[in-house]
Image (spheres, helix red, strand yellow):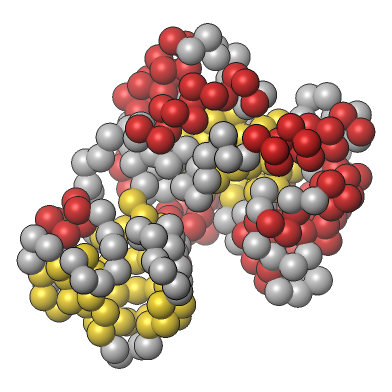
Amino acid sequence: MEFYATLGDPCAKRDILDKMFQAGMTGVRLNMSHTSLSKCAPLLDELYWPAARQARQEGAHLIVDLQGPELRVGELSQPVSLREGGEVLLGEGGVPIPQIILRTARRGQQISIDDGALLLEVRRSSSTVLLCRVARGGTLRSKKSLSLLGTEIDTPTLTPSDLDNLALAGRYGVTHILQPFVRNRQDIQILRQTLDSLGLEQVQIMAKIEEQQGLDHLDEIMEAADQICIARGDLGNSIPLWKLPAIQKNIAQRCRTAGKPFCLVTQLLWSMEQRPVPTRAEVCDIYNSVLDGASALMLTGETAAGKWPVHAMGYLVRTAQEAIGAIS
């Protein structure tokens, strides 16, 4: 079984990476929505790969999570505090957001930000600005995910920055590509053709299921991709949250039937961003996910931004191993 961490400042240290490998980590994810492969060169060449060799993890994985068709908030000069019941301006003169959202959003629609942590309701719209009421408040930061709930937006499969990163994938030893917001077989085919043209036929494609379109076309996506990734963050935004457990179970069952490996990601140990010990619900979630057939588990904010990356990896691995022992 594979155990992945997302690289970020808390674990961008050689001693921390050594301890995470010792805890059972088998690979890492790089989120290209916040960086690029070229910027990560020192981290990979001087820290990650030497730590993998020291741990005798010659087969360690390096997963690049592309930007893909995902929409995000632009660069902010500083975090913005949004008070529930207040108002915020998106677009010209306010929070920068993609033009396609400005062109598409209409009065009464809801905008989810940062995997649903923030929720806005459009009060007034124009081609350049949206005036929104804050339905769920908090702190807004740069580059957070953005979605217009209930609306399918047609965006390119690969962005220019994705193509730049793919061109460097061979140089930095990338083993897997996480393709976000996969909508259908064509998204996978476009990525596969791009990899083949770069001589990267061996690189595995992990298709992230994050919205209704992906669910609707899951069978054809499974046929085209090497692995499925159940990405519960944005998936939980695209459906009523109380439906998420049943949908996760359904995807897992369909992957098992098709013999398709699948990875589970998002908030596996979310409380450990701030605490050294997980909740009972979190370890039960991990245990049950392994019983459901997950072949990989991935930490995100727990290691990219959390205070306890080594502890989080330890709890992830030990809990999963308990489940594996129960199966065998």
Q: Is residue 29 visible?
A: yes
Q: Residue furthest left?
A: 126
Q: Quadrant location of the C terminus?
A: top right
Residue pictured at 59% horizontal, 50% vertical: 265
User: Hey, which quadrant is residue 149 in on the image?
Assistant: bottom left
Residue 101 at what x, y percent from top left? 21, 56
Residue 82 at what x, y percent from top left? 38, 82
Residue 156 at what x, y percent from top left? 28, 35
Left or right placement of residue 72 versus residue 298 in this view: left
Where 64 falls versus 285 (above or below)? above
Q: Is residue 291 visible?
A: no
Where 248 falls versus 46 (above or below)? below
Left or right placement of residue 287 versus residue 244 in this view: right
Between 15 and 241, the one nearer to me in the picture: 15
User: Hey, which quadrant is residue 280 in on the image?
Assistant: bottom right
Between 320 and 73, the one nearer to me in the picture: 73
Residue pictured at 51% horizontal, 54% vertical: 232
Left or right placement of residue 256 versus residue 197 in this view: right
Count numbered badges in the picture. Answer: 0
Where 220 falls versus 112 (above or below)? above
Left or right placement of residue 318 versus residue 258 in this view: right
Where 41 falls versus 277 (above or below)? above
Q: Quadrant location of the N terminus?
A: top right
Residue pictured at 69% horizontal, 65% vertical: 306
User: Hey, which quadrant is residue 105 in on the image?
Assistant: bottom left
Between 218 and 234, the one nearer to me in the picture: 234
Residue pictured at 73% horizontal, 59% vertical: 10
